[in-house]
Image (tube, helix red, strand yellow):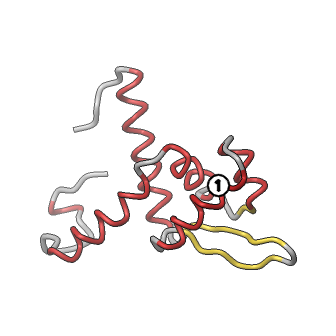
Amino acid sequence: MHLSPANRSHPQDPGAEQFARAAEVLGPLADRPRLVLLHTLGKGEADVTTLTAACGAARPAVSQHLARLRLAGLVDARKGGRRVVYALADGHLARLVGEALSHADHDLSGSQRHG
């Protein structure tokens, strides 16, 4: 992803509100279990049992992480029979998490970074 003016979807520089909201979005992502949850949800909807298995954390901890992500507006929940099914609030989050993981992969592998 390039942020040069020719490739930007927004014609003007971000304002204070955009920076504030971006900081609110990035805050909850700075946690390994929440990144795993968001990455898993980027593949599709899932219930707490599936997310607990993916995350490797205890079910109460996963529920707390999901509550924080819902409160931040990053995850949506709906009843699916007797279970609650979670999904990402929008596709931007899947790409954001993917970019963060790609950046981490470049750091860990010593690969050349993109310019």
Return the residue found at the far top: 110
**Which residue is the site of mark 1?**
62
Horizontal side of 63 relative to 83 (left or right) equals left
Q: Residue at x 13, y 70 (%)?
A: 13
Q: Is residue 100 above or below residue 92?
A: above
Q: Residue at x 35, y 27 (%)?
A: 107
**Label 1 Cα crowd, 10 Å radius (few <14 / some 14-19 / many 20+):** many
51 vs 103, nearest the viewer: 51
What amino acid type should be assigned to the residue bearing mark 1? Answer: Val
Q: Position of residue 19 (x, y in %)?
A: 21, 68
Q: Is residue 92 above or below residue 34?
A: below
Q: In which quadrant of the rendered view does residue 81 lie? A: bottom right
Horizontal side of 34 relative to 81 (left or right) equals left
Q: Position of residue 103 (x, y in %)?
A: 37, 38
Q: Is residue 44 above or below residue 73?
A: above
Q: Position of residue 28 (x, y in %)?
A: 43, 58
Return the residue found at the far right: 82
Q: In which quadrant of the rendered view does residue 109 lie? A: top left
21 vs 66, nearest the viewer: 66
Q: Residue at x 76, y 53 (%)?
A: 50
Label 1 SS: helix
Q: Quadrant of the C terminus?
A: top left
